Amino acid sequence: MAVYKAPLKDINFVLNEVLDVSTLAKLPGYQDATPDTIQAILEEAAKLCENVLFPLNRSGDEEGCTYENGVVRTPKGFKHAYDMFREGGWTAVTCDPEYGGQGLPATVGFALQEMFTASNQAFAMYPGLSHGAYEALSRHGSDALKKAYLPKLVDGSWTGTMCLTEPHCGTDLGMLRTKAEPQADGSYSITGTKIFISAGEHDLAENILHLVLARLPDAPGGTKGISLFLVPKFLPKADGSVGERNGIRCGAIEHKMGIKANATCVMNLDGAKGWLVGELNRGMPAMFVMMNAARLGVGMQGLGIAETSYQSALAYARDRLQGRSLTGPKNAAGPADPIIVHPDVRRMLMIQKSFTEAARALSLWVGMLIDEAHSHPDADKRAAAEDLVQMLTPIIKAYFTDMGSECANLAVQTYGGHGYIRENGVEQLVRDARITQLYEGTNGIQALDLVGRKLPMKGGQAAQRLLGEMSAFIAANKTNDRMKEFVEPLEKALGRVQDAALFLMQNAMKNPDEAGAAATDLLRLMALTAMAFMWNRIVAAAYKGLAAGNDNAFYEAKLATARFYLARVLPQTTSLNHQIKAGAATVMALPAEAF
């Protein structure tokens, strides 16, 4: 069976020894976010994940959501779990105290997201989407909207969605047709159809707040004419309680490959009453607040799935007896050895282990950067942190979800034929993981965003900040004899990133297809290098732990895993650089009709 136990020891190692989370308490507004407080929060979350959410993961997949006459019901146990989640304050952890939140740093939120999605991805999407709606509304909503709606999102009694996609347009939102017509009372009447709306209808909360993209009749064409509107399922009364039903209803739910316990809805708007969020014809910048938060959240889903996949594969590899070790029996008293003795099984486990541990460090670093960008008193440091977050967002979304899917497949492979059988639980991870590479912008779109928007951003300044972080670490550690074996591969990989970027600078302006053909390879090249950077930071922390004489086996395992990553995974950067520099010609040469 699939297993999951919150990796608290490793999370705390990253927070306290690799990143020094104690620095967060020095930022304005985060004085209470001490390492002890953070650890206590994570320990409570672990209990919820292990005892409540994870046991519902397989049963939720088996039962799925049901739809009847516009009503959607979540699987058995989900409503009770959501009530526990809300009553425990988990919807409010990183929200503004002005609206009832706990005001804790985003870093804490990232650690919680990993655990929530690892234990039950479909469940975690309900409060996750609500938090994205909270972020968009808190930044772009009017004071009246914030006062009326944010406390309900924060306490979890109302949930949120994002309504972008339409039957004829997904990525190309400039084609959307949903109409918004101004009304005399200052509201808008909104009509249209949205599809693929996660958590668009359910029975967990008393109201659902939809953030809907629509276009006024006289708006400019394309994305420049899109506005954002808040459309509640039930219109609030003056006292804040739910009132009459609004003109937005679920027309159907999708029958999906995975995340079956999360309702993916067709939402029909027929003169639904909505209120403008932000400025007219400026809906995309407001919605991107939610989308960027969602992209990082989906990246955390990839990490969460990878962690559960690894733990499940490891447990099975330790127990399953099959064959004998190539170097002689290791379980002489038994009929066969556990399969963990076999090199190819270890290869699969090490790929998963070396990904999850570095990915955890990278994601928590991004959490700390978000906190710096939000709260650091120095404007230059806020700007620098924001640049790094912008650069790393498409990398985390795309690479983490690609690897989440790969790790889930490796778990099935480790189980062998038993992995293909539904009752053993790991085939669900494959199905659940697959959507993460698609929603919130496919991974190909993330790669185009990296190449087309992020690399040229601020004249390349943001990219230089990221590469500069790595270069500075290399310069500071390359003469350290203990660090040399780890720093040298990082330095070579960084050189490949710079070489590939130079190639694109020289060729993409002449032929834009060069950027398109190289985008996915470049994102993976940069991701692998960023992971090598995190492994170097992990190694530096591990050596300090060894010097202190504490838990030597834990720190030695970090060094061994880092060596595997640098020797067996990072060399992919060489072939990726060659692929990028091969150019677009072979990709684009075949006429469309010849396929």
Image: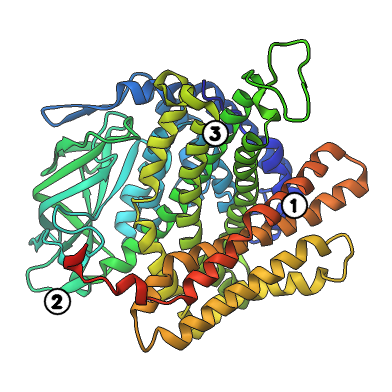
Q: Is residue 592 left or right of residue 45?
A: left
User: Residue sitting at 49 percent across and 52 percent down?
Assistant: 96
Q: On residue 308, which mark appears? A: 3
**First-in-chain label (2 vs 3):** 2
Marks 2/3: CA distance? Answer: 47 Å
Mark 2: few, some, or many residues within 10 Å (few <14, many ≥20)?
few
User: Residue sitting at 52 percent across and 48 percent down?
Assistant: 94
Q: Nearer the viewer, mark 1 or mark 3?
A: 1
Q: Is residue 524 left or right of residue 465?
A: left
- Give the camera-side residue of 442 and 550: 442
Q: Which residue is mark 2?
A: 220
Marks 1/2: CA distance? Answer: 55 Å
- Give the camera-side residue of 276 and 169: 169
Q: Label 3 sits on what residue type?
A: Thr
Secondary element at tag 1 = helix
Secondary element at tag 2 = loop
Q: Nearer the viewer, mark 2 or mark 3?
A: 3
Q: On residue 563, which mark appears? A: 1
